[in-house]
Image: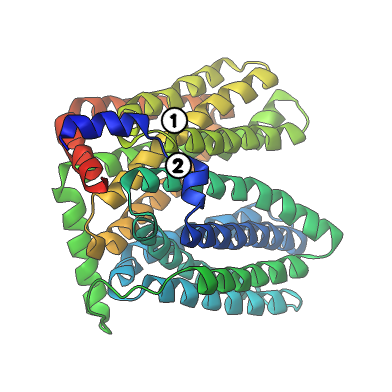
């Protein structure tokens, strides 16, 4: 079959949700993801409310969310290579056990007069296993689904579910705490990891590690350096990842100042939640829609969608009516689907034996810039206004995409994606 024939076949065949969910192993991965991520959000809300009740400090309450970024940055970069050197299923099971135990201890400590630093330390330890789990899970998706078109569709679905879990988990966390206590919500999180463990144990095949195991910490740093060189040496993956990192701060700008924007506008605080939900809901919908398209179509959408993220946010500066702002931020959220091909192609274009470390580094960089985005947006908002802060971050995003257009390796990326399609057939 010629590449032209493959291209025409690929155009006719778009992977749908039914097709990827027909894969039993993938259903197990998805179910485990839903269980553990929803539990994570419930726990973060519960701990934040607990800290707020004990101290009355909004800063310390916000710190409970910020704590989760540090392990993602450190753990994702350093521990991602373990997904290449050990069984990925075993690593996910280990991460679930470790998180269940640590969060269980945290729940017990939350019912005592334990100092805050102890609670934060336990949360930090629990979160340290999350990037290990995520690196192993992301590296497993091509193993489970095989075909590039199924991988891109599956990545879109997992991205959409991740965003939905954020919204649902945050709401459920508040409800559980309201009806019972923060301690009960933390126990719910611990149980969610046990559920995730059971699902993975039942559904996922145990595949051997791609590389030899290591007990040396020095080897982890060597793998980190090697992964960085692999990522930066390849023009296609470098372009994709640098675009994702460069846009990360702009993506979180609306969520960072939504509550402050509503306060400044004299609206009810409930509108702040609606604004944040509009971005997340849009991103979840966009991820599904883009994930169903062919790999080549997804590649063509990356830069246009990245631009579309920023354009509605620029209009925030004129401080439109709150209902119109909800629509604008929803549209911006839908366009965040450019991250689906960024994530899936970065994984697919990496050799199987190196996927763990490369995915880990990519996740770590995105987490670091995301955390920076929250801080910078808040800093600008404090000194000007929330609306102006979002506008500035949108302008920065447009600058990043403009550089991306100039430096975008279109020919190389198209060639790489064509090879993926040929391999998939």
Q: Quadrant of residue 11?
A: top left
Left or right, 69 with reference to 188: left
In this view, 62 is above or below 264: below
Residue under numbered circle 2: 373
Q: Position of residue 59 (x, y in %)?
A: 62, 53
For the residues marked 2 and 1, what is the alpha-carbon distance in whole angstroms? Answer: 8 Å
Query: Mark 2 or mark 1, which has the lower sequence index?
Result: 2
- Using the image as rendered, state which of residue 220 and residue 26 is in the foreground: 26
The image shows a total of numbered marks equal to 2
Mark 1, other Cα within 10 Å: few <14 / some 14–19 / many ≥20 = many
Q: Position of residue 264 (x, y in %)?
A: 68, 27
Could you say whether the residue bearing mark 1 is in a helix, strand or loop?
Answer: helix
- Using the image as rendered, state which of residue 171 and residue 384 is in the foreground: 171
Residue lying furthest bottom in this view? 215
- Looking at the rendering, in which quadrant would you find the C terminus? top left
Q: Are marks 2 and 1 in contact (CB under 8 Å)?
A: yes
Residue found 32% across the figure and 46% down from its top: 148
């Amino acid at each position: 079959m010629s590449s032209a024939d493959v291209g025409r076949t690929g155009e006719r065949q778009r992977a749908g949700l039914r097709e990827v969910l027909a894969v039993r192993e993938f259903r197990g991965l998805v179910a485990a993801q839903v269980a553990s991520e929803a539990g994570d959000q419930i726990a973060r809300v519960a701990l934040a409310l607990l800290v707020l009740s004990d101290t009355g400090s909004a800063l310390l309450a916000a710190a409970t969310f910020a704590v989760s970024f540090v392990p993602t940055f450190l753990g994702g970069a350093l521990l991602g290579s373990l997904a290449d050197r050990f069984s990925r299923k075993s690593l996910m099971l280990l991460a679930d056990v470790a998180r269940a135990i640590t969060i269980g201890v945290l729940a017990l400590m939350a019912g005592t007069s334990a100092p805050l630093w102890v609670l934060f330390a336990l949360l930090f330890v629990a979160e340290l296993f999350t990037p290990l789990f995520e690196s192993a899970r992301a590296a497993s998706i091509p193993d489970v689904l095989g075909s590039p078109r199924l991988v891109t569709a599956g990545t879109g679905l997992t991205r959409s579910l991740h965003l939905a879990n954020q919204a649902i988990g945050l709401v459920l966390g508040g409800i559980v705490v309201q009806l019972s206590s923060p301690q009960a919500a933390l126990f719910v999180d611990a149980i969610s990891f046990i559920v995730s463990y059971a699902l993975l144990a039942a559904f996922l095949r145990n595949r051997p590690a791609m590389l030899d195991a290591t007990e040396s910490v020095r080897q982890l740093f060597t793998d980190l350096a090697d992964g960085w060189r692999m990522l930066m040496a390849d023009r296609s993956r470098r372009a994709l990842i640098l675009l994702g990192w460069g846009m990360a701060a702009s993506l979180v700008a609306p969520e960072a100042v939504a509550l402050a924007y509503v306060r400044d506008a004299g609206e009810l605080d409930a509108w702040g939640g609606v604004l944040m939900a509009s971005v997340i809901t849009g991103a979840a919908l966009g991820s599904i829609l883009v994930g169903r398209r062919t790999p080549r179509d997804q590649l063509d959408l990356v830069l246009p969608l990245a631009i579309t993220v920023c354009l509605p946010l620029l209009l925030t500066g004129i401080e439109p009516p709150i209902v119109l702002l909800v629509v604008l931020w929803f549209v911006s959220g839908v366009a965040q689907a450019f991250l689906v091909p960024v994530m899936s192609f970065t994984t697919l274009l990496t050799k199987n034996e190196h996927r763990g470390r490369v995915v880990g580094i990519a996740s770590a960089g995105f987490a670091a810039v995301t955390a920076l985005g929250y801080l910078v947006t808040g800093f600008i908002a404090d000194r000007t206004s929330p609306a102006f802060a979002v506008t500035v971050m949108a302008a920065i995003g447009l600058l990043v995409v403009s550089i991306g257009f100039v430096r975008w390796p279109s020919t190389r990326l198209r060639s790489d994606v064509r090879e993926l399609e040929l391999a998939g057939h």
